Image (cartoon, rainbow, N blue to C red):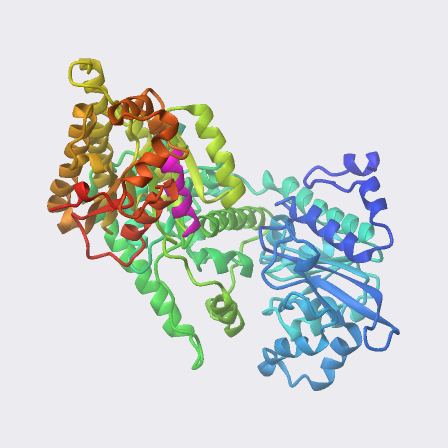
Amino acid sequence: MSTSATTQFKHVSYLWDDAKAAELAGDEVALLVYRSNLLGADLRLTNYGGGNTSCKAIAKDPLTGKDTEVMWVKGSGGDLGTMKRNGLAALHMDRLLNLKNIYRGIEHEDEMVELFNHCIYDLASKAPSIDTALHGFLPFKHIDHLHPDAAIAIAAAKDGKKITQELFGGKIGWVKWQKPGFDLGLLLKECLDENPGIRGIMLGSHGLFTWGDTAYESYMNTLEVIEKCAQYLEDNYSKKGPIFGGQKIESLPKEQRLEKAAALAPILRGFCSSKTKMIGHFTDDDRVLQFINSNDLDRLAPLGTSCPDHFLRTKISPLVLNLSTGENVNDTVAIKEKIAPLFEAYRKMYVDYYNTCKHPNSPAVRDANPVIILYPGVGMFSFAKDKQTTRVASEFYINAINVMRGAEAVSEYTSLPRQEAFNIEYWLLEEAKLQRMPKPKALTGRIALVTGSAGGIGKAIAKKFAAEGACVIINDINEERLQIAMEEFKQLFGRDTAASTLLDVTDNHTIEKAFAVTALAFGGVDIIVNNAGISISKSITDHSIEDWDRLYDILVKGEFLVSKAAVSMMRKQGTGGDIVNIVSKNAVVAGPNNAGYGSAKAAQAHLTRLLAAELGGDKIRVNTVNPDAVIAESNIWAGGWAEGRAKAYGVTVAELPAYYAKRTLLNETILPDDIANACFAFVGGLLNKSTGNALNVDGGVAAGFLR
């Protein structure tokens, strides 16, 4: 790694490793992937999923065997930071350039995207993106197109063109805002022809193009240009006076901010889920607080964002709450009455925006609820279809804040005209991309808390729910077991599916904390599975009072306390929900040495029926799953239960699995996954009109049949 290079940058990260690059020497495509990953690793250079890179190199034509020039460019929908070789589109350059001959003008440029397919070199190629022409018409071997906040701040400034010319001495060209596409590619080439020797082009309100003859030269050029933009902004922050017009209100202390956010998030989620269940995200990042606490918030927030990558994910503008930092957000009725008009006004604004700007062939209006919600003094909420989308939306709005701060420091921030924004948001090519996305899974948009989910049956249930699209809260009383489970979930489902918290179902304080974690992580809760439990098998004379109390505290009191907290949060949301109680065959079957456990299970079962009767008006369904003899991976067999049951049935512990299987009508061993499937049957959408029911998963035990 070049020591001199690492020390010349203050605002961007120099990550190039000469030794690693030397291993890839001679393979321009490998170097493209390497460069792309480095650029995507620094969010100051480009945001998640944003930007694209390319290289042009000579390859063998598979039909003629002759050398031909091929362009490899990031394909549609990829992310630079994680992109692999299979994320690239590869096109014959001669065919791509020949498309100019049949181009019918900007009114017909969308048809050119399909024609890119006639230029494909690699039949395993990723679908070419709309930006393909922007790379193809520039003659450079290596090109980077990024959306760095520092550059967009200048590109979105009222005097952006003048600033760019003066800052770079004419070495960076300027192309005014135009929707990405074939015609914009022609404008880039025209800008280069009129300004030979430039090292890059700034796209008004959009981003930056830079290039080089080698992967390293392109990388260095990109870093140097962005570094110069960032330093220029820094030099000007103090010259124009206080940032964002200075501070208007003070933030609450950190702990109070989180308390307010946790209490409010389910209410906001309910409003934002009026059409489709949404997942939430909260941040009180210092950059967010500086913006939402400022005098300029009311002026800048309605303007909306500038870069297309931003508003495609954040909607055209945020909703700013009319709540003070001293508001009692625990008064759900009063809060809903106060903010309901804000949501009504936002939805009307969005529908008016659609109706004013729509074209005859525009797609139907989409969900009119806000994505970004700002609470001055507290923080920023975002709501979208899944956790990754809402987290990324939050990150993009922070990018937008950075852009507004920079543009205001050097000039005056300008957003895209509403019509231009609409033309991007409801672009038929964007709609086609949305239509190609996989259909939502059964539990997409749902949030589940399964007690005791770091192992055994609970973990199997949480895995099933996560695999079906839900966000899950992994919890346990054992921190080490919790950490191991969380690592497993991250490896299986990625970083956005699960959050974790310590939870003792007998301790109301830890329950309240767990639901606060749930609200901050995902915005609320939809599914509760009361799974945490213990088992004690003793004769009535051997049963101690401590045994009895422990069974009832964990099984009955725990189910009561967790359900009570869940109902409170579900009512805040106003969107219904599911409670599933993991009970047992022993709730209805009288067996030996089982007075404490069996009677506690019976209490759990009846509590299910009582809650089902009480909560129907809230559209909260309450159902029971009755397992039996789930031995594999289950913690129930610890603490002497296996020995106790073996003694009761006159067999050895080793003989218990076969004993339990043989006594069932189906002669089957019951596994944790079987219980998980039963829980999914209740919450997966097919039984939305069922409540107060019990589902036996025991292989068929006639004595356990419900009557």
Q: Which residues are magenta?
A: 456-468
| Quarter occupied by residue 104 | bottom right
Closer-to-camera residue (187/439): 439
In the rendered image, residue 503, in percent from the top left (x then y), is placed at 34, 28
Vertical placement of residue 585 versus 418, above or below? above
Position of the N terminus by quadrant:
top right
Q: Is residue 466 magenta?
A: yes
Left or right: where 545 falls relative to 679: left
In the rendered image, residue 616, in percent from the top left (x then y), is placed at 14, 50
Left or right: where 204 falls relative to 467: right
Asked whether the viewer can see residue 169, the reply is no
Left or right: where 519 falls relative to 435: left
How many numbered circles are shown?
0
**Magenta stretch mostly in which secondary structure?**
helix
Closer-to-camera residue (482/98): 482
Asked whether the viewer can see residue 510, the reply is yes
Left or right: where 427 falls relative to 324: right
Q: Residue at x 74, y 40 (%)?
A: 14
In the rendered image, residue 42, in percent from the top left (x then y), is placed at 65, 44
Q: Residue furthest front?
A: 650
Closer-to-camera residue (95/531): 531
Vertical placement of residue 494 versus 587, above or below? below
In the rendered image, residue 441, in percent from the top left (x then y), is placed at 40, 57
Q: Is residue 696 magenta?
A: no
